[in-house]
Each structure stands twice: as structure tokens, then as C-alpha cells.
Image (cartoon, grey):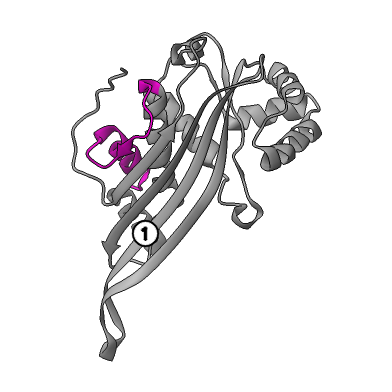
Amino acid sequence: MVLIAVPACASSIYGWQVRTNSTDMPPSFHPGDLEQQAVALFPAITMPGLRGNEVGLGRFLGEILRKVVPTWKIVSEQEVSTRINRQGLAARMTVMRSDYEQSNILDHEALRKIAVAVGVRYAFQLRLAAFTQTMTDRWKIPAFDVRVMQTRSSIMRLALQLWDTETGELVWTSVAETNMANEAVSQDPVYLEDIARATLGSMLSDLLNGKTASQYTPVNKLLDNLIREAMPKEKDSKADTAEGTKK
């Protein structure tokens, strides 16, 4: 089991829960292999109705991996796109992604060619299946049209796959559903980045510890810290406000 020490701190402003269902890994593979063999972070894929929401998920995954397993040889989503474009394989990547949307399979021939160009043995592929944001008034003074308290919540469903680009084997798969909520006066929603960090961190915890069908909450300080680190610091917000006033 992988144990990661993190500083103790107060819980995040959110209440959240993640349920994961992850597969076992084949005997031929161990997460430690990614210390010797590079792994690419392919851009996330989603259905037409959610397009735009998947942007940035690969970057969040990379940031979490660098914190949790700094010894892994990670090729970032940005660098993957750059290397593919330099090798003239953008069209090939587009076709492979389009086929993947329909089949949930990365074509082996295309995958191997792209992996050689990128210089990796393994590849992570993300799929955003659902993402919603809701805001509901909990306490309001109708006579003055003043909202005192509002419930903000988001739901996310993600799938994460790890592929062996050399053999075409689907090494590992995890699916997760996250519910994140908070009560506040502000108009801010539960941001996609915050719920994505909790979801991705939970899936990676399954991978590193060989777990399946797990449940995670803010009691897990590592995951809670991943959310807190993404939030703008209060002093930074004040500084921005002061700077704006000066202008």
C-alpha cells in the first residue's frame, strides 16, 4: 500500500463524496513500472453536449500525479499535443479520438504510432461522462429580495484508463462519481477544478493502492488538500481588489 504523508489542516469549505469502481491490474504490470517507462496524458474526451468542460482535466491530472508520485515519468497533456503536432500526426490523433468516442477503444496501430512520436510506453485517457452545477436558495427574505444562504452543488462522472501502447492492452480502468456541495452567500458555483481534483485524486488512490469499489470523503486529508490548494488564497483576492481600486 502507498502511504503519503501530508500536513494536517482544517477541512475544505466543501462537503464531498467520491465513489469509485476500479479494475484489478494484470500481473504483468505494477504502478512502479511508470518510474522506468514514460506515460502520456492524452487530452480528455467527452460527448458533444459537454464539450468544453473537459478542457483542463488532463492538466489537473498531471498536477496531482506530480505531487503524489513525483518519480513517475509523466509527459504532460501540453507536451503530448506539441510532440504530436510536430510529427505531423494531428489528423491521425483526431481520427483515433473520434473512433474512441464510439468504441471506448484506442486503436492499437494508431496508438503505437502516436506513442513512438511522443516517446512513451503508456498513456492515460480521460473521459468526462457528466458534469452539472446547481444553485438553490435555502434562506431568502422575499420582501427585500435578499438571499441569505444558498446551496451550491456539482456532480461529476469520470472514467480514466491506462493503456499499454506497445501491446494495445487496457491495463487499468476506473470510473468515479462525485458529489460536492456547500452552503454560502456568494454567487460562486462549485467549480469544475475543485470537483475534478477530488475525483481524480480518488481514482489515483485506487491505482496506487490496488483498491476497487472505494469511497472517499474529506476525512482523506490528501484529497482534501488537493482541493484546498486549487482555491485562490484570501490574501490574494484582497490584493487583487486593492489593485483594482487603485486603477
Q: On the image, which quarter does residue 68 sit in?
A: top left
Q: Nearer the viewer, residue 77 or 31?
A: 31
Badge count: 1
Does residue 74 lie above or below 222 as drawn?
above
Does residue 33 lie above or below 210 as drawn?
above
Q: Is residue 210 left or right of residue 86?
A: left
Image position, residue 198 (x, y; %): 37, 41
Does residue 70 lie above or below 57 as drawn?
above
Q: On the image, which quarter does residue 199 sit in?
A: top left
Q: Is residue 246 visible?
A: yes
Image position, residue 20 (x, y; %): 40, 38
Q: On the image, which quarter does residue 11 sit in?
A: top left
Kindly state the secondary structure of the residue where label 1 is placed: strand
Residue marked by disc 1? 153
Q: Is residue 172 left or right of residue 237?
A: right
Q: Is residue 57 one of those drawn in magenta?
A: no
Does residue 102 lie above or below 63 as drawn?
below
Residue at screen point 38% across, 22% down: 210
Q: Nearer the viewer, residue 162 or 71?
A: 162
Extent of the magenta region:
208-233
Q: Is residue 93 left or right of residue 142?
A: right
Q: Nearer the viewer, residue 44 or 245?
A: 44
